[in-house]
Image (spheres, grey):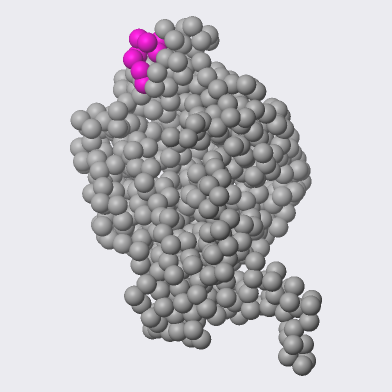
Amino acid sequence: MRVLVANRGEIALRIIRACHEEGLEAVAVYSDADRLSPHVRAADLALPLGPAAPSASYLRIDRLLDAARQSGATAIHPGYGFLAERAAFATAVEQAGLVFVGPPASAIQAMGDKTEARQRMQAAGVPIVPGLTVPVAEAAAARRHAAELGYPVLVKAAAGGGGKGMRLVVEPAELDMALAAARSEAEKAFGDSSVYLEKYLERPRHVEIQVLADHQRIVHLGERECSIQRRHQKLVEEAPSRAVTPLLRERMGQAAVQAAAAVGYRSAGTCEFLVTQDGRFYFLEMNTRIQVEHPVTEMVTGVDLVREQLRIARGLPMRVPQGPLVPRGWALECRITSEDPANGFLPAAGRIQYLQVPTGPGVRWDGGIEAGQEIALHYDSLLGKVIVWAPDRAAAIDRMRRALRELIIAGVATNQGFHLRLLDDPDFQAAEIDSQFLERRADLLAPPPAAPVREVLAVVAALVEEEYRQARRPQIAADGSPTGWTRAARAEGLR
Amino acid sequence: MRYYVTVGDVDLTVDLDADQVRVGERTALARLEAIPGTPLRQLQLDQQFRTAVVERTAEGGWLIGIDGARYEVLVVDERTRHLQGLTQSGGQRTGSGSLRAPMPGLVVRVLAQPGHRVVQGQPLVVLEAMKMENELRAGSAAVVGEVLVSPGQAVEKGQLLIRFSELPPLT
């Protein structure tokens, strides 16, 4: 089997690595902006897709199928994002006589429409977050439903995922604008502007269950906690979760397996739940793809999820033992993004001048960048992920701190400093977290440096300023007396 | 040579004398050497060695990356500091009289019109970057003077989007 990887960045590299370990050939695709990106060289073959804009490259089903034909690929792995959860893509791949490395199109369809998924889960007896199970058409109806649910409510894209097309509405006056914003964002991200309403739960934890299904059976691989989010974008994930007891793991695991069975699932998938402070859990949605945070599950279960996806796609049984799962140790993941904490976490652009990735015991770097690479604003801001494993949570935090201090990304602003501050926070260390944690803790986002760091920074600044001035200082004339030009230049240098 | 360094909202004085540096109460041997073939520096403070990444900003400050985090730092010498003190003593109000794009992106919606009175935190312009919509909000109460962009327009980082005609009264 030769596998075309219909993605870019870290996940493209991750899949290419899995292909090679499975003894399969990998075919990369690239936009004009990615011609020199690392995934292009990591693959056995690579084919161009078109201009940088995703709509002209990574979202072009016709060009991806052409690339598969030209390269002789027999399977397509979609990764995450882009076309990963478009049922039309899975269908087109199958109709072209190729294998889609993922669930059947019908399962993507059923789970992709969040309102339909909510109906199905309700029917299957899986608890869902209170709210609508059909899209809301007009603002007037939305106002009525929101009042019934009670504010605050969430406006969510029916075709949504990853926080796109989602808006929190605290009071009625904000509803109209939130609807417009969510619709417009949903239209752009998913090509579907339908939205629905959900009750906004107070301080829930975000806990998700990994499922894996081959042609014979469906198993769950335990939970990941992803409560550390900013504007619904996950930043830190861990496995297992402090909030999950073995009993709760089994109950949530069973619910996730049921959810997967209800849509005829195959391959890797994730059921997202909200867990409230009293230990109740509610189905949020199922992500019918490999997820960004899949490595933490791999670290505590020893299962390589991407390799298993490839095996299942070939019709082979998955290599996961029968019987209940006991996670081993603790894994943490920090997403390193090109978002500038000093600039309100807005995406930053720039060229990677230097890259040093963390290594040593228990550390894994899943990245998609290298020195010299231009980070533009066409794509997702994820640069890479630092993942650590240790025997327990406290040791994992210590190891992550050590790893993050080793990581050097020069040339583009990243959120690395934020992660280090989070690891030092007593509430995070005590696992007293929920999905609204960062909204309350704006102080962690970009505080001024602590006193000892301040002094070191001041010394570096003075030394580098001195060096800069020395380099610009004009030469004195041979007789030692400065000319008019050098005097003028010197005055400039002093400015 | 004496430098005045601003880190966050704290001012520090650094004295350099050959290899010796004094900052606050501390005096140390200090060196900052380029690591050949890389854009990195090695900082030495007595027996302590660190990797530092330094970049000059457009505003003439420094971005310094050390121990996994990155900070913006401003440095001036004694003479510049003296001059700054003179020019700033006139008491000119330096409140933000405009809204600028904090990043490059595409204007999706403009929510303010000339003549509108806006309150602090009110969304004024929606800017799309990396497929996310970002609401740019008023930093303080003001009256919108001029709107310089329209939906569909691509803007650069720092580009002027809205000019305010009237700033809130000084309190």
Q: From where the camera sits, is residue A433 visible?
A: yes
Q: Is residue A344 above or below residue B34?
A: above
Q: Is residue A478 left or right of residue A95?
A: right
The image shows a total of numbered marks equal to 0
Q: Is residue A229 above or below residue B65?
A: above
Quadrant in the picture for the C terminus of chain B: top left
Q: Residue at x 43, y 18 (%)?
A: A197
Q: Is residue A420 left or right of residue A174?
A: left
Q: Residue at x 48, y 45 (%)?
A: A292
Image spot of residue A384 (x, y percent): 51, 54
The image quarter containing residue A62 is: top right
Residue A166 or B148: which is nearer the viewer? B148
Image spot of residue A91 (x, y percent): 62, 29
Q: Residue at x 67, y 28 (%)?
A: B146
Q: Is residue A473 above or below residue A248?
A: below
Residue B26 or A484: which is nearer the viewer? A484
Q: Which residues are magenta?
A: A145-153
The image quarter containing residue A35 is: bottom right
In the displayed orientation, state which residue is furthest to the bottom: A479
Image spot of residue A78 (x, y percent): 59, 41
Residue B77 or A449: which is nearer the viewer? B77
Image spot of residue A335 (x, y percent): 46, 50
Residue A102 lies in the magenta-colored region: no
